[in-house]
Image (cartoon, rainbow, N blue to C red):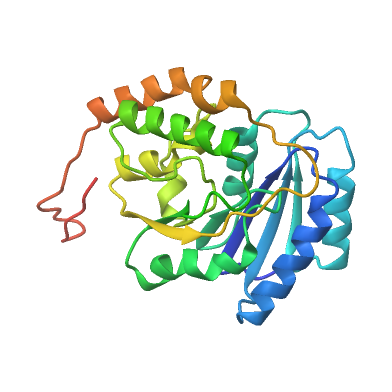
Amino acid sequence: MAHAAPEISIVIPAYNEEDNVPLLAEELRRELAVRGIRAFEVIFVDDGSSDKTAQRARAEVARDPEHFRLVRLERNCGESAATEAGLRRARGGILVTMDCDLQNAPADIPALIEPVRKGDADCACGWRSDRMHGDTGWRLMQSRIANGIRNALSGESIRDAGCTFRAFRRECVVRIKIFRGMHRFLPTLIKLEGFRVVEVPVRNRSRVHGVSKYGMWNRAFAAFYDLLAVRWMRSRVVRWRVAEDSLEGGSHSQ
């Protein structure tokens, strides 16, 4: 049975997160209900997991098909592919992306979507303002190095480009160019399309189950070629604004 399109779609890429799926699903149900958010869908995107991630997500769909969905990739394709698969299938007017490792707090979703709902911004990016809580000093150093490299080469000033906890209007991703590693540069790509991006402080919690999929190599250096691509895109972007259109009678910008 088809359900009415929700206001909010929460896209959660998941790779070998079998223990976290039911915990995150329950927390989302509880926190969204407390805040009066009922028109939502949660899309777990199983990125070719080798454990029971898909089965756990399927159980959540069976329990609450109105609010939960499963998208399963036939093989492991990486976080960018899983994120795109979820975003392209999402039905909400506001899209939210978050990790499945429980480090992102569902209680922060209202703060993320507020500037988008109010029209103050097109995209709100999570900024983990208290990284000392939830991360080791070594991981914090890795993140700072990676963030510095990204900003230096991309010409950005995003304080926490590594945080994929974000909310944005559906229109922001319609024209986004998808490539491997895209999830790291989504704010930059959205800004290239002329949209407004803000940062919102969010919590950073410790991982309880499973292991991190990122280390020093893929956090700081593996994205180097992607950064060069983004740098090139920034230098070649073309912007235009229609002054007059006799058919539509209005102006439009690009």
Residue 60 coordinates in the image, percent (x, y):
84, 60
Residue lying furthest left: 243
Q: Where's the N terminus, which quadrant?
A: bottom right
Tell me what residue is drawn at x 37 percent, y 20 percent: 228
Viewer-nearest residue: 136 or 155 = 136
Name above or below for residue 252 compared with residue 3.
Answer: above
Tell me what residue is drawn at x 43 percent, y 39 percent: 176
Residue 136 coordinates in the image, percent (x, y):
62, 41
Name above or below for residue 23 compared with residue 101.
Answer: below
Viewer-nearest residue: 1 or 118 = 118
Tell me what residue is drawn at x 54 percent, y 26 percent: 180
Residue 251 coordinates in the image, percent (x, y):
16, 56
**Which image quadrant is residue 48 in?**
top right
Would residue 2 be visible to someone looking at this image? no
User: Would residue 110 be found to the left or right of residue 102 on screen?
Assistant: left
User: Would residue 125 be found to the left or right of residue 109 on screen?
Assistant: left
Viewer-nearest residue: 14 or 142 = 142
Would residue 56 be visible to someone looking at this image? yes
Tell me what residue is drawn at x 41 percent, y 41 percent: 175
Q: Where's the C terminus, which quadrant?
A: top left
Name above or below for residue 235 compared with residue 174.
Answer: above
